[in-house]
Image: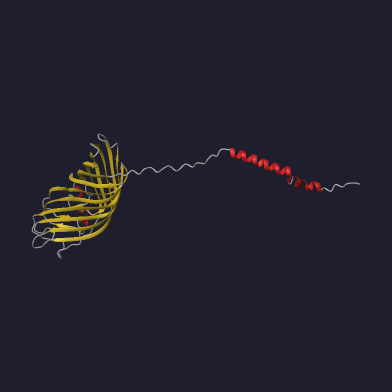
C-alpha cells in the first residue's frame, strides 16, 4: 500500500510544538531565570535638581539731605533794539545788558524705604540784574521801539536796567536702583519774572504822552508761572567710603505748562496819569536741568561737593522781547494800551558748593 504525503503534518507542526509539554516548560524556565536577573540589577533613581533660589532682595533704607550755595548768571538777551535815534543809530539795545553773577541756594531732602521713597527740593536765586549808566544824547529826538514807534522829544539821557528773578520747587517719587543710581519722577514748579525799565529824561515841555512831564519811565514786567511733570536720574560713582572721592551727575527734564502775564507801566505826569497795558498768554515750556560735581566722602554719612549746574527753559516770556509787542503810546486816549506776548529761551548756569548727608 502506498502512502501519500498530504502536507498536513507540516501545517500542524507549529501547533504541536507550541502545545508540547517541553516547549511550555522551557518558556517558564526562561521567564524565571530572566526575572531573577532583572531582580539583581541595581535601581538608579532619576534625580531632578531644583531651580536655584532667587537672589536675595537688597533693601535700601535711608534718609538723605543736601544743601548748596549757588553762584549763577544767565545768558545776555538777544540783540533787540529798544531805543533808537536817527543818528548814530541804536541808543539802547537789549544785548547791551550784560549780566553778572548772583548768589542763590538749593536744597533737597528725602526718605527711601526698601528702594522706594519720596523727596522734595527747591532753589532760589537772588535777582540777576544788569544796569546801564546814563547815555547822554544832547537833546535829540528818540524813538522807543514799540509798534508803532513811540516818539520822545528833546531827550538828554537814556538809561535802564534788566532784572531776572527765578525760583522753583519740586516733589518726586524716587526709586533706588542700586547704591549708586536713583531714578525720580514727579512735578516741578518754577517762577521766572523778567523786568525791563527804560528811563528817558527830557528837558522839553511835555508835548506827548511819551515824554510826560519831562521824565518818561517805562517798565515792562513778564511773569512766567510754570508747573508740570518731570523725570530724571542721579548717579554717584565711586567707592563712597570715608576718605574717598566720587563723581556725581544729575539730569532731569520736564514739560511745563506756562501761564504768562505781561504788564506795562508808563509813569507819566499827574495831569496825564499813568498808562498801563496787560496781556495774558499760555505756552508749553520744555525744561532741562543738570549738574555735575566732584565729592569727597568725609565720613560714612557726610560728604562735601563742588560742581557746575545749569537750567534751560524754552518758550518763556522775557521783558525786552515785549517792547516790540507794545501798541501805540503816542496817541492821546484811554489810559490803557494793547500789549502782546513774545516768547524766547532762557538759560542760567553757574557753580555750586554743597554738603550731602545720608543716614
Residue 350 shows in the view:
yes
Residue 327 shows in the view:
no
Left or right: residue 214 versus residue 280 is left
Choose top left, top right, bottom left or bottom right for residue 23. Answer: top right
Left or right: residue 176 versus residue 131 is right
Find residue 56 and report its horizontal and vertical position in percent: 36, 43
Which image quarter is the C terminus in? top left
Find residue 175 and report its horizontal and vertical position in percent: 31, 47
Left or right: residue 92 versus residue 34 is left
- In the image, 226 versus 305, the foreground residue is 305
Give above or below for 1 relative to 266: above
**Residue furthest out toward the bottom:** 333
Choose top left, top right, bottom left or bottom right for residue 239. Answer: top left
- In the image, 251 versus 53, the foreground residue is 53
- In the image, 217 versus 112, the foreground residue is 112
Find residue 165 and report its horizontal and vertical position in percent: 18, 51
Amino acid at each position: 500500500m502506498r502512502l501519500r504525503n498530504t502536507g498536513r503534518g507540516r501545517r500542524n507542526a507549529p501547533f504541536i510544538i507550541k502545545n508540547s509539554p517541553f516547549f511550555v516548560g522551557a518558556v517558564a524556565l526562561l521567564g524565571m531565570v530572566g526575572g531573577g536577573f532583572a531582580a539583581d540589577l541595581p535601581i538608579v533613581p532619576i534625580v531632578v535638581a531644583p531651580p536655584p533660589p532667587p537672589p536675595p532682595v537688597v533693601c535700601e533704607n535711608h534718609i538723605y539731605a543736601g544743601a548748596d550755595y549757588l553762584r549763577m548768571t544767565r545768558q545776555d538777551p538777544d540783540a533787540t533794539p529798544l531805543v533808537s535815534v536817527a543818528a548814530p543809530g541804536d541808543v539802547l539795545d537789549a544785548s547791551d545788558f550784560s549780566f553778572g553773577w548772583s548768589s542763590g541756594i538749593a536744597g533737597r531732602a528725602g526718605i527711601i524705604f526698601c528702594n522706594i521713597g519720596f523727596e522734595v527740593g527747591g532753589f532760589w536765586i537772588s535777582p540777576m540784574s544788569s544796569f546801564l549808566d546814563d547815555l547822554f544824547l544832547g537833546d535829540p529826538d528818540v524813538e522807543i521801539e514799540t509798534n508803532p514807534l513811540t516818539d520822545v522829544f528833546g531827550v538828554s539821557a537814556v538809561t535802564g536796567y534788566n532784572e531776572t528773578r527765578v525760583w522753583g520747587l519740586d516733589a518726586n517719587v524716587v526709586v533706588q536702583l542700586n547704591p549708586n543710581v536713583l531714578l525720580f519722577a514727579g512735578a516741578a514748579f518754577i517762577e521766572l519774572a523778567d523786568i525791563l525799565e527804560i528811563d528817558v529824561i527830557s528837558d522839553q515841555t511835555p508835548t506827548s504822552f511819551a515824554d510826560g512831564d519831562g521824565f518818561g519811565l517805562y517798565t515792562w514786567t513778564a511773569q512766567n508761572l510754570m508747573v508740570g511733570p518731570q523725570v530724571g536720574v542721579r548717579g554717584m560713582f565711586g567707592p563712597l567710603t570715608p576718605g574717598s572721592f566720587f563723581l556725581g551727575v544729575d539730569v532731569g527734564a520736564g514739560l511745563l505748562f506756562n501761564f504768562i502775564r505781561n504788564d506795562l507801566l508808563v509813569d507819566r505826569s499827574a495831569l496825564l496819569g499813568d498808562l498801563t497795558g496787560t496781556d495774558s498768554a499760555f505756552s508749553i515750556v520744555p525744561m532741562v536741568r543738570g549738574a555735575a560735581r566732584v565729592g569727597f566722602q568725609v565720613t560714612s554719612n557726610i560728604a562735601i561737593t563742588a560742581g557746575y549746574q545749569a537750567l534751560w527753559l524754552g518758550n518763556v516770556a522775557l521783558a525786552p522781547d515785549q517792547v516790540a509787542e507794545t501798541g501805540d503810546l503816542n496817541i492821546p486816549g484811554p489810559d490803557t494800551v494793547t500789549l502782546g506776548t513774545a516768547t524766547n529761551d532762557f538759560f542760567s548756569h553757574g557753580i555750586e558748593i554743597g554738603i550731602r548727608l545720608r543716614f
